[in-house]
Image: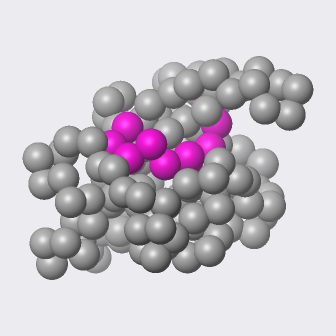
Amino acid sequence: MADGKGDRSGAADGGKVERSDAEWRGELSTESYQVARCGGTERAFTGRYWNEKAAGTYHCVCCDAPLFRSEAKYDSGTGWPSFFQPIDESAVAEKVDRAHGMIRTESLCARCDAHLGHVFPDGPAPTGLRYCMNSASLRLEKDDD
């Protein structure tokens, strides 16, 4: 943690975070590295947050940027943590993903380009979106009770 308060970004001003591949490998677990930095996907119903009910803020596992609030989390039945909106529209970037013979919308951390998952147009109100995220790309900071 760079500042002793949980900020691992090295970008105190909220700017773009860049690290070498070796630095990311050294900072992340093997699973988080494979998912967040290499674009992998954890198996459904295996991630630590797919069934998490605690109130709090979900942060990027790589740079600690706040991404989602628990109030936007819902059970999509997919086995991955799903949210109907990010904490702020600027927190999550999107790009077209043409891998595996499909065209999908990839969700990335806007601060460090970590692969978070994909967004689909089949979510609940009020947005109609389903941000289908990988637990390995997230870190939950629970609210104080």
In this rendering, position of residue 135 left or right of residue 7: right
Which of these two is toward me, 80 or 92?
A: 92
Left or right: residue 79 compared with residue 112: right
Number of numbered labels in the structure image: 0
Residue 50: percent from the left, percent from the top?
A: 65, 61
Which of the pair 29/77 is nearer the observer?
Answer: 29
- The answer to if 118 sits in the magenta stretch is yes
The magenta stretch is 110-119
Find residue 97 and report its image quarter.
top right
- Residue 17: x and y, percent? 30, 49
Q: Quarter of the image holding residue 64? A: bottom left
Tell me, yes or no, if residue 61 can be seen here: no
Residue at 58%, 66% in the rendered image: 32
Residue 24 rendering spot, x and y as whole percentages? 45, 65
Is residue 4 found left or right of 89 in the rendered image?
left
- Residue at position x 56%, y 55% in the image: 36
State how the image is colored: one colour
Image quadrant in which the C terminus is located? bottom left
Residue at point 83%, 25% (across, down):
102
Give how far across and how far down residue 43 sits, in percent: 80, 61
**Residue drawn 75% across the image and 25% down it:** 98
Quadrant showing the N terminus: bottom left
Residue 32 in the magenta stretch? The answer is no
Residue 143 appearing in the image: yes
In the rendered view, tell whether residue 71 sits above or below residue 136.
above
**Height in image: 105 above or below 10?**
above
Quick one: which residue is furthest to the right in this view?
101
